[in-house]
Image (tube, rainbow, N blue to C red):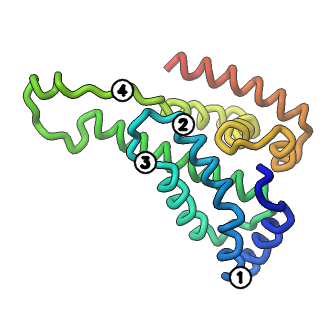
């Protein structure tokens, strides 16, 4: 995550916090490429032909970011961690709405022949992962946050330790525990 100078991004975030609306206009070109990289990473895990594209995901995250004026940005890493959380939430909401539709929400009547002719590839179960992450957060919030920052946010161990203000060794222990805990939880579902 070293596409733009961290000090430039951090300074613009702090200026934006202090009410400088022009800082947001200068900030977005600096972070756009990294946000798009995060979005592509998320979309790579989705099935081919997904109706939501990386650019649309970045745009939706951008709209939510500019609406989050009450966030007190600490630095560049904090910004990307929040962005990753937003993208995760957007994709999970999208997956939940698709699941609702697949389970009969807003369904129309079709004949058996039509139903047999339509086939879909199985979705990556982002909803199950989100549910498991929410359960992990109830057990140990920091371990869940490590997963969000590393897996969804693409942060390194060092960046994650900086955001959480813990050692890199603690991040690695939390990461290993959380991965096995989530795997068991998802398999049990």
SS state under label 2:
helix
Residue at 48% from the left image edge and 35% from the top image edge: 46
Q: Tell me where residue 114 appears, x and y as whole percent.
A: 12, 28
Q: Which mark is residue 52?
A: 3
Q: Position of residue 181 (x, y in %)?
A: 67, 22
Q: Quadrant of residue 120?
A: top left
Q: Are marks 4 and 3 in contact (CB under 8 Å)?
A: no
Chain-order first, disc 2 or disc 3: 2
Q: How many marks?
A: 4
Residue at image point 17% right, 22% down:
116
- Examine the image and state in which quarter residue 5 appears: bottom right
Q: Nearest to the eye among marks 3 and 1: give it.
A: 3
Crowding at dot 1, Cα within 10 Å, few <14 / some 14-19 / many 20+, comes out as: few
Report the residue marked by disc 1. Answer: 19
Q: Which residue is label 2 attached to?
A: 44
Between residues 112 and 164, which one lies in front from this camera angle? Answer: 112
Where disc 3 sits, the SS reads loop
Q: Tell me how far mark 2 sits from mark 1, CA to CA.
A: 36 Å
Q: Are marks 4 and 2 in contact (CB under 8 Å)?
A: no
Horizontal and vertical percent for residue 155?
76, 43
Going from N to C along the chain, the mark reached first, 4 or 2, is 2
Label 2 CA crowd tier, 10 Å (few <14, some 14–19, many 20+)? few
Q: Tell me the number on the disc at residue 121.
A: 4
Q: Mark 3 packing: few (<14 Cα in 10 Å), some, or many (20+)?
A: few
Q: Check the image and report above or below for 38 versus 133.
A: below
Cα separation, mark 4 vs mark 3, equals 16 Å
- Label 4 – label 2 distance at C-alpha: 15 Å
Callout 4: helix, strand or loop?
A: loop
**Whole-percent x and y of residue 19?**
71, 82
> Is residue 109 or residue 43 the one in the foreground?
43
């Amino acid at each position: 995550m070293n596409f733009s100078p961290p000090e430039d991004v951090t300074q613009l975030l702090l200026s934006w916090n202090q009410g400088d609306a022009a800082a947001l206009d200068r900030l977005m070109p600096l972070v756009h490429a990294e946000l798009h990289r995060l979005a592509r990473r998320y979309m790579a895990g989705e099935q081919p032909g997904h109706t939501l594209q990386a650019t649309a995901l970045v745009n939706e995250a951008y709209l939510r970011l500019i609406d989050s004026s009450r966030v007190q940005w600490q630095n560049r890493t904090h910004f990307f961690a929040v962005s990753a959380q937003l993208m995760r939430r957007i994709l999970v909401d999208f997956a939940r709405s698709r699941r609702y539709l697949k389970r009969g929400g807003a369904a129309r009547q079709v004949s058996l022949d039509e139903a047999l002719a339509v086939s879909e590839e199985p979705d990556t179960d982002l909803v199950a992962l989100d549910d498991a992450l929410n359960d992990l957060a109830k057990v140990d919030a920091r371990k869940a946050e490590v997963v969000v920052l590393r897996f969804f946010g693409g942060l390194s161990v060092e960046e994650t330790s900086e955001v959480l203000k813990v050692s890199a060794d603690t991040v690695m222990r939390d990461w290993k525990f959380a991965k096995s805990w989530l795997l068991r939880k998802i398999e049990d579902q």
